[in-house]
Amino acid sequence: MSGTMKRIAAGIVAAATPLAIWAALTIPSVSRFLPKCLLHETTGLLCPGCGGTRAVFALTKGHWAEAFHNNLLWPVTLPLLAFLWVSLASYAIRGKALAVPFQNTRTAIAIAVLIVVYGLVRNIPVYPFTMLVPIR
């Protein structure tokens, strides 16, 4: 195990922890520090991540329905990111990461296709696809 890799893992964990706490304590409608989607700002199209920040805030407050309405992918993605955080913390502390449950090319391709398809269908201006537009 490389000391550099342990430091990188510790740095990621150290950066992610206060961000998670900030998300739990911030009210998105009054925060001036929230990022804007460059794709949406320039083209009006929704990327697969649009509404993700609002979904994270809703999840930290326990508002699952609102989170799913803002971005269908984030409530599913966050547990995976939490697992990654724990794995990185384990690597930083013990020098041993947790076993990643799916480490193959097919899974990575399937996830990439899902993200691209989600990004495309949420821009179709017809019901039921309009239900994928985030709450404004």
Image (cartoon, rainbow, N blue to C red):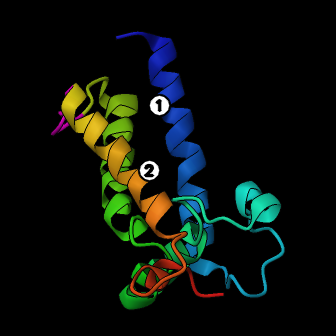
Where does label 1 land, which residue?
9
Q: Residue type at mark 1?
A: Ala
Q: Nearer the viewer, residue 92 or 80?
A: 80
Q: Residue 74: x, y in percent?
A: 42, 66
| Residue beneath the point at 72% across and 64% down | 40
- Kindly state the secondary structure of the residue where label 2 is placed: helix
| Residue beneath the point at 72% across and 56% down | 39
Q: Is residue 103 magenta?
A: yes
Q: Residue 34: x, y in percent?
A: 74, 68
Q: Are the residues at dot 1 and dot 2 in contact (C-beta closer than 8 Å)?
A: no
Quadrant location of residue 102?
A: top left
Examine the rendering and report whether any part of residue 103 can be seen: no
Vertical order, 21 against 5 (above or below) = below
Q: Is residue 12 left or right of residue 87?
A: right
Q: CA distance from mark 1 to mark 2?
A: 29 Å
Q: Residue type at mark 2?
A: Val
Where does label 2 land, which residue?
116
- Nearest to the eye among marks 1 and 2: give it: 2
Q: Residue 122: x, y in percent?
A: 49, 70
Q: Nearer the viewer, residue 53 or 39?
A: 39
| Residue beneath the point at 30% across and 50% down | 83
Magenta segment: 98-104
Quadrant location of residue 111?
A: top left
